[in-house]
Every structure is written in structure tokens, then in C-alpha cells.
Image (spheres, helix red, strand yellow):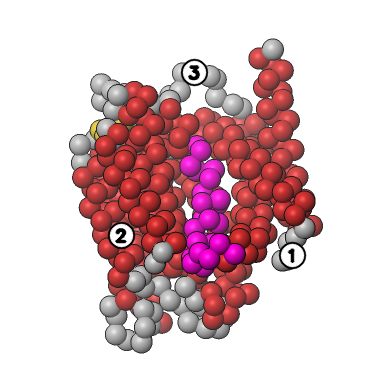
Amino acid sequence: MITRLRSLTTRWTTLVPVLAVVLLVFTWGRKDLPGVVVALVTLVLAGAVLAAVHHAEVIAHRVGEPFGSLVLAVAVTIIEVALIVTLMADGGDKSSTLARDTVFAAVMITCNGIVGLVLIVASLRHGTAVFNPEGTGAALATVATLATLSLVLPTFTTSKPGPEFSGAQLTFAALSSLALYGLFVATQTVRHRDYFLPISRQGEVITKDHHADAPTARTALISLGLLGLALIGVVGLAKGVSPTIESGVEAAGLHHAVVGVIIALLVLLPETIAALRSARRDRVQTSLNLALGSAMASIGLTIPAVALASIWLSGPLVLGLGSTHMVLLALTVVVSSLTVVPGRATPLQGGVHLVLFAAYLELAINP
């Protein structure tokens, strides 16, 4: 029976990513999809998310932490960056704030939405959520620095009118983002890898998962390829249903920024589900690696990409946040710091992060 279940899982997690890419090919560029097609795309999109989570876990089991969470975070972000650049190329002046809005949405979703859910799930199931404050603190400090340099400073610079960087400033921000992200990855995977490994309630580092044997190298490589297909399907199909989402948002009388939030939520679904699964297994550090790593990769890879794309793209590139979002970002950094310092959290800390996330959603609907 167990063998049959594993075979069934292998079959659908192999077929769905391929089906998602095929469906993406047939629906790409079409703005007015029939209702039946939208329903099919939504169904396949959900399946692709679950398949992506499955293959990410296979890879993580093979390569171990923190490499596993890094693979999923970077893979999602690279495809997300490609989507942003594509939309900016097609959108003209209307897309001037697209990179800023997408990156900030990713930061709020990961640092408050995912972190809040992870802390609540782990603490309710196991009493308290236990993690390594050294690794998590280093990740948080990097996210806060990247967000401030890339999203806050443009509002206050004077070399160019409006919340924009000048050419030299944008180059500096792009190079700084790449340097900080590269330094963090080296710290996470080489010099201080033990800071980012799950820990037991006695404070001991957990280096192996003893629940199952590690997959073979061939299986991991196949999962890596299928993970790429699944993520391409997730991001591409999310873009495909975005006109329908946009029409629904406009019909409901909501602010246009809600469209970006919904798409960001769809794109980050694989990381959310993977993080919650790790939290249920009392691997909170893995969950936080996913959440903060995704926020960091979103900034550290998006800003250099749009800086490079701005060479040939027409129209302004607005990166500076407004005052309301800067307050939310500052509060997120302060609250996250207080959450990280003790190395353990209760449902209260998770609830605080979720309230901040709810405030972000409320202000997106009613700015």
C-alpha cells in the first residue's frame, strides 16, 4: 500500500508541472480567457504549487539544510524577477512602480505573513517555536539593510526629482544588493552553516532527518528539473489569470494595488506551504530560512535586474516607498528583531506579525 501511494505521488507530481507548462504555452498573451479556461488554469496552478513543494522537499532532503530552503527561495525569485522585467517591458509608464510594489509585497508577505503563521503553528503544536537567533538575526539584518537601501532611501535622495535613484545611485544600490546577498549566501552555506540548521529543544543542532532515507542523486536532479517547470507554471499561470483578477478587483471597487498583492500571494504559495510543513515537524529554523531567504532574494536579485533593464526600458523607475509603507516596514523590522532575540516564540509573537500583515492588506485595500 505504501509503495502504491508513493508511486501515485510520483506520477502526479511529475505530470502536473509538465501540464502547467503546456497550458501556459496555449494561454500566454491571451487577456480574455473563457471562464472554463480560467477554472482549469486555477486548478492546474494549485496543483503546480503542491508539486513545487514536493520537489523542493525532495531536493532539501538530498542536499540538506540550509541548501534546500535556499534552492526554493532562489528558484522562485529568479522566475519572479523575469516576470517583473517582462511586465515592465510591456507596461510602459504604468509599470514604473511595479518592481517596488512587488518587492515590498514579498517582504511583507514573508516577514509577517509566513513568519506569523509559522510561529503560531509551531508554538501551538509544540509549546514554543524554537530557532537559532544567530542565523535568523543575520538574515533579518540583511533583509532590513537591503530594504532600506533599495526602498526607503530613494524617497529622500535629491539628485533626481521624485522617489527615484539617479543612474549612479541605482548602480550603487544594485551592486550593494548583489554583494550583500552573495555574502549572506556564503555565510549561510559555508562559513557558518550551523547557524541556519534546525535546533532541538535542548539547543542541539539537528544535522539529519532520520524519518526517511535521502533520495538518490538521480531522483534529486529529476526533482530539480520538475521544480523549475512547476515554478515557471506557477508564475506564468498567475500572470495569465491576472486580467481576470484585475477585472474582479475593479468590479469590487478595490484599489488596483490589491492585484499585485494577490499575484504575490500566488507566487509565494510554494514557500508558504513548505514553511508550514517544516513548522509542523518542529523545524522552525528551516521555515524562517525560507521566509527571510525569500525576502532577501526578492530584493537582492530584483533590484540589480531592474537596474540593468532600466538601460533599455523607457519610463521612470520608482523605487521609493510612501510614508505609510515606510512606517509598516520600520515596525516590521522592530517587531522582528524583538521576536528573533530570545530564540523562541509563543503564539503572541506570531499573532503580532499576522496583525502587521493584516494591516498591510487593509491599507492595500483602503490606502
* Residue at the image position 49 percent from the left and 18 percent from the top: 211
What residue range appears in magenta? 251-274
**Disc 3: CA contacts within 10 A as few (<14), some (14-19) or many (>=20):** few
Report the Cα–Cα distance between label 3 and label 1. Answer: 47 Å
Mark 3 or 1: the one toward you? 1
Residue 250: x and y, percent? 57, 66
Up-down: is 128 above or below 332?
above
In the picture, measured across the screen, residue 115 lies left or right of residue 44, that is: left
Please identify, in this view, whether the residue under mark 2 or under mark 3 is nearer the observer: 2
Q: Quickly name the residue at label 3.
A: 211
N-terminal of the two: label 2 or label 3?
3
Q: How many circles with numbers are drawn on the protein? A: 3
- Res. 11 visible in picture: yes
| Residue under the image location 72 percent in, 66 percent down | 31
- The x, y position of residue 249, in whole percent, is 56, 62
Cα separation between marks 2 and 3: 39 Å
Q: Badge 2 is on which residue?
A: 329
**Which quadrant, please, contains the N terminus?**
top right
Is 339 drawn above or below residue 30 in the view shown?
A: above
Image mark for residue 32: 1
Q: How far across and down, in percent of the image, does residue 15 sit?
A: 74, 38
Amino acid of disc 3? His
Q: What element does badge 2 sit on?
A: helix
Q: Position of residue 226 (x, y in %)?
A: 66, 42
Q: Is residue 257 magenta?
A: yes
